[in-house]
Amino acid sequence: MYKRQTLLYRVRAVASGQDFVLKTLHADSDAADTAALAHEEWLARRVASADFPQMVSWPARSHLYYLMSWHEGATLARHLEQGRRFTPVEAVDLTARTLKALAALHRLAIVHRDIKPDNLHLGADGRLRLLDLGVAASDGQDAAETFNEINNPGTPSYMAPELFAGTGAATAANEASDLYAVGVTLYHLLTRKYPYGEIEPFQHPRFGDPMPPTRYRPDIPDWLESIMLKAVAREPANRFETAEEFLLALERGAQRPLRVARRTPLMQRDPLLGLKLLAAASLVLTLLLLFLLLVR
């Protein structure tokens, strides 16, 4: 999958002793990479929210790089690697904060395209920050420029079914696929699994029904499982339409639980099932008539 290779460094200002994150490119990067990093910086400067690392202006740059604020802490992926077991309450809180950050992006017509625990940083100050606009797209134009059926930005296990070639008419990432990735992130935080299994790069997965998360975590309440299954539904029309709608469902919780089908109706799973049943019934009827004619 598409991913521009960048370099990250922790640097310190000598005068103030303050730490920053410096992001730049490899020495062998081409003109397209240079333009992409400049565009990434432009996007990051548009996002004036404490839910993201803050851009730092630095005078007299003689090389291509940009600076961001440094925050002590660790990504949610790192917490999982260290063996942390998130409770449903903790996971819901982290997801709600992720959705608020994502809503700020979507209001600016920016699609993140790589939501996952590696890009969610829980600071020592307790704030959750959404990282890495490296493959983000704005106003739909950038998505169209970088998308094709075998080269869609993102991490496969967090990519919505419609983004894969081989699952119908693959499409470019959008707000709906960002929300799907949030749903998978919530699922993974609680279960360490993926709703459709882990997906490898360049794999053409087949999507059936998502595995109910209570299969792995029986302590997940019914209302939360319904939200999770809606968030990772195979069809975009069955998911949340906006970050605000997803957030509202979490805030309502058990007081106003969602009703979500645990399995796709048989006719939806196989649209030709009706014709198949009709053909089978016709065949049985024909054989029965033949049998009656032969026994006379």
Image (tube, rainbow, N blue to C red):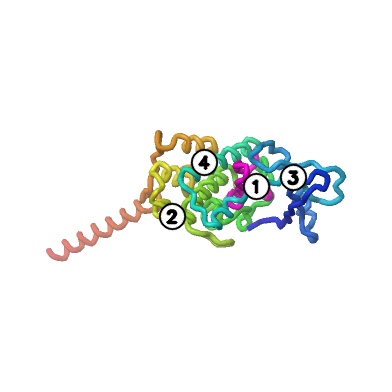
Q: Residues within 10 Å of mark 3 (few under 14, many from 20)?
A: some
Q: Residues within 10 Å of mark 4 (few under 14, many from 20)?
A: some
Q: Nearer the viewer, residue 31 or 84?
A: 84
**Where does the magenta region start and end?**
109-134
Cα separation, mark 3 vs mark 1, equals: 13 Å
* Position of the C terminus by quadrant: bottom left
* Residue position for label 4: 93
Cα separation, mark 3 vs mark 2, equals: 39 Å
- Residue type at mark 1? Leu
Q: Earlier in the sequence, mark 1 or mark 4?
A: 4
Cα separation, mark 1 vs mark 4, equals: 18 Å
Does residue 112 appear anywhere in the picture? yes
* Residue position for label 3: 41
Res. 253 mark: none
- Residue type at mark 3? Glu
Which-is-in-front pick, marks 1 and 4?
Answer: 4
Q: Quadrant of residue 3?
A: bottom right
The reply to whether dot 4 and dot 2 touch (C-beta < 8 Å) is no
- Residue type at mark 2? Gly
Q: Earlier in the sequence, mark 3 or mark 2?
A: 3
* Residue position for label 1: 131
Helix, strand or loop at label 2? It is loop
Estimate the x, y position of residue 205 in percent, counting from the top left: 51, 59
Q: Is residue 99 left or right of residue 281?
A: right
Q: Is residue 136 left or right of residue 208?
A: right
In magenta segment, residue 62: no
Cα separation, mark 1 vs mark 2, equals: 31 Å
Q: Is residue 58 left or right of residue 152?
A: right
Helix, strand or loop at label 3? It is helix
Q: Is residue 230 left or right of residue 274?
A: right
Q: Earlier in the sequence, mark 1 or mark 2?
A: 1
Which-is-in-front pick, marks 3 and 2?
Answer: 3
